[in-house]
Amino acid sequence: MNSWLRLLRLPHLAAQAGIDRDINASIRLNFLYAASKSGLLRQMRQWKERSELQPQLETLDAMLDVGVALGELKRQGNRYRISGKRALALSGQDGDPLAALIEEFVTCHAAVYQDFANLSARAGKGDYLAGKGEVIARSSRLLEPFMVEFAQGQVTGKGPLTMLEVGCGSGIYLHHAACANPQATGIGIDLQKDVIAETCKRLVEWGLASRFRVMYADIRQACAETIGPFDLITLYNNIYYFPETERVRLLVSLRERLKPGGKLAMVSLFAGKTVVAANFELILRSTLGCAPMGTVENLVRQLHESGFREVNMKRLIPVQPFFGVTASL
């Protein structure tokens, strides 16, 4: 039988073709993760001889062959260089958030799916965020272009202003606040000690150490430095670390730390019907220390219940349920 005819007679041909494309996409993500994490891509922004590439492992040739087959690398004789747009983006310094996103997906998100059949033995939860604080802080920078205007809008033209950022991560939004308002000062807290150490260094590099400081602290625990009162409290991309049943109590606690006329500003992806939102909801529901996102409408209700008078919401990414929410006294 003709091989093409045999191919056309395969059962579930359309499904097989679709799965083949999906597998190729998965191989690409795994290649980009490995080549970026190992430093291989940074070496090949220009033509390099095979003998110049590191690490000189027995598997290097096979890894290079995968890159060439995917179109991410180009080969001329025994020389290699990047040719794919994805690989080129990851090889540059400004591609670090993309590299972190791929690492987060390959090492964290994929593990949730791999473990799904066995999660019942662990009450449906796994410790998928263990050791991932720095990676998540880096990948979160991809949201920055959509959040900058919202974050700066909370401080622009406000004059002297004190702020508390809950879950400060990389500290980038403290930086944006400082740039938008030269009279803004404040404190950032986070539960990831390794992230805090790096953020402290960044504040020094940015020349902001005299205006802002960051520290390890849990907003749910008594701490003199976080009592306030503050003009502005922010929670960016972290409301899902607080259980739904505790959110009203948390919001009341934050309201009590605000000065008269103070404001609470929050940004988050919320439950929705997009693939991105559905995937993230699965990751959160499967991970120890995380809670479902909830809907933006439910958060607005909780804010009113917590004693905030005026609540406004703004979609920050078209199509996606990604909102900025402000609540005033």
Image (cartoon, rainbow, N blue to C red):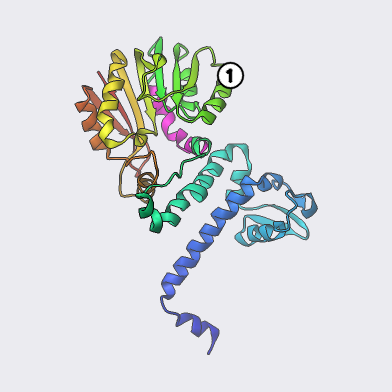
> On the picture, is 327 further left or further right than 23?
left
Q: How many numbered discs sit on the rendered protein?
A: 1
Q: Which residue lies at the image location 51% right of the left edge and 44% below the top edge?
A: 101
- Magenta stretch: residue 60 in it? no
Q: Nearer the viewer, residue 43 or 229?
A: 229
Location of residue 124 in the rendering, given as x and y in whole percent from the top left corner: 35, 50
In what element is the residue under mark 1?
helix
Location of residue 261 in the rendering, given as x and y in whole percent from the top left corner: 28, 13
Rendered image quadrant of residue 284: top left
* Residue lying at the far bottom of the rendered structure: 1
Amino acid on which disc 1 is placed: Val
For the question of whether residue 263 can be seen, the reply is: yes
Bounds of the magenta segment: 138-153
Q: Count neighbours of disc 1 (C-alpha within 10 A) and say few if under 14, some if 14 to 19, many if 20 or more.
A: few
Location of residue 294 in the rendering, given as x and y in whole percent from the top left corner: 28, 40
For the question of whether residue 156 can be seen, the reply is: no
